[in-house]
Image: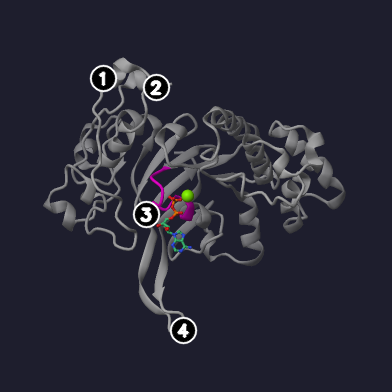
Amino acid sequence: MAEPILEVSGLVKHYPLTRGIVFRKHVGAVKAVDGVDFRLDRGETLGIVGESGCGKSTVAKMLVNLERPTAGSIRWKGEDITRLSGRALKTVRRNIQMVFQDPYTSLNPRMTVGDIIGEPYDIHPEVAPKGDRRRRVQELLDVVGLNPEYINRYPHQFSGGQRQRIGIARGLALRPEVIVADEPVSALDVSVQAQVINLMDRLQSEFDLSYVFIAHDLSIVRHISDRVGVMYLGRIVETGTDTEIYDHPTHPYTQALLSAVPVPDPRAREHRERIVLTGDVPSPTNIPSGCRFRTRCWKAREKCAVEVPALAVPPWFAETGGPAAHDSACHFAEEKQVVPAEEGRG
Ligand SMILES: Nc1ncnc2c1ncn2[C@@H]1O[C@H](COP(=O)(O)OP(=O)(O)O)[C@@H](O)[C@H]1O
Ligand SMILES: [Mg+2]
């Protein structure tokens, strides 16, 4: 087994819902993240996928310490970072950096690119002494494929793809070991998405990085992920290697998501089954009992309303082994090939 660099266990973030301005009355909670477990091994990419509102950004913010978990632990090389403070916390923060979703709003328009990329050195001057910064920032621009002479320009002078390269350069400034990328290409044109993903792929081997790569669409993470976790309403419902998830999904929600991925080949399109989910995603203030996916699941039975399915290898697959034997939180997990394996690849 590889060495885990991050281990997340029982992670919860509930935002209290209050009514009234003077007398704030507690009237419930937004269960944005409601019990998430995963591990990230050194040098690997874990893709986290799920529809908008399922809690992906909240997980990302807890990983980089922008939000404090309501419960659960985040272990960095064995140490729970949710309990750290002072110097120890600062060291961990340096090592886990975030790349944000929208390069149009996440870069300060009044700062030059040089100041944006070099800003992390204000907090961590030990990484780059003052006299050394300009050279470092220029090196970072070069590393992400931008002209080092652009150092004095402002964000509006760049395209969306270039801005995301600036965001990535900033994320690399402190030489972190982990990058949490929250939908880094969702705001970009399709033609530019692949370039940014290829860049991240190259940087990963160059700088020995581990990635948590978040997306709302399974097709985006396929090429970059070693393993994938599928999220629904604040929880991971299925997790496995890319082959296990894409070619042998066993959770109905993953199967539905895969059936929505466009298939370019018309022959392949004919062969596959289209799963259309009924109803809307329930509100995270009012999560269904038992299996949280049951209100939209075509397989739901009585047991699903009563018993929360654990994220584990279903015993009937554990017995036979093979690619269907991976973690799936479904009482009736069943293999279903949604995208024909050959055509679906690539
Ligand atoms: N600060 C907050 N206060 C209250 N609710 C929040 C807050 N941040 C996020 N939420 C809610 O938590 C849920 C998950 O949000 P988010 O993590 O942004 O999902 P995703 O990134 O998957 O789209 C959503 O219902 C969202 O409205
Ligand atoms: Mg988000």
Say whether residue 142 is magenta. Answer: no
Q: Is mark 3 within 8 Å of ligand 1?
A: yes
Q: Secondary structure at mark 2?
A: loop
From the viewer's perspective, tell me whether residue 202 is left or right of residue 258. right
Q: Which residue is mark 3?
A: 234
Determine the CA span between mark 3 and mark 4.
31 Å
Determine the CA span between mark 2 and mark 1.
16 Å
Q: Position of residue 286 (x, y in %)?
A: 29, 62
Q: Residue furthest bottom?
A: 23
Which quadrant, please, contains the N terminus? Answer: top left
Depth check: give the residue in front, 302 or 3: 302
Earlier-in-chain disc, 3 versus 2: 3
Q: Which residue is mark 2?
A: 345
Determine the CA span between mark 3 and mark 1.
34 Å
Given contact means CB atoms under 8 Å apart, are the residues at marks 3 and 1 in contact?
no
Name the amino acid, label 1. Answer: Glu
Name the amino acid, label 4. Answer: Val
Depth check: give the residue in front, 154 or 332: 154
Q: Is the residue marked by circle 3 packed among few (<14), some (14-19), or many (20+) residues within 10 Å?
A: many
Earlier-in-chain disc, 4 versus 1: 4
From the viewer's perspective, tell me whether residue 132 is left or right of residue 77. right
Determine the CA span between mark 4 and mark 1.
60 Å
What mark, if any, has residue 270 been given in the picture?
1
Depth check: give the residue in front, 115 or 305: 115
Q: Position of residue 312 (x, y in %)?
A: 29, 46
What mark, if any, has residue 22 been given in the picture?
4
Which quadrant, please, contains the C terminus? Answer: top left
Given contact means CB atoms under 8 Å apart, are the residues at marks 2 and 4 in contact?
no
Region rendered in magenta: 49-58
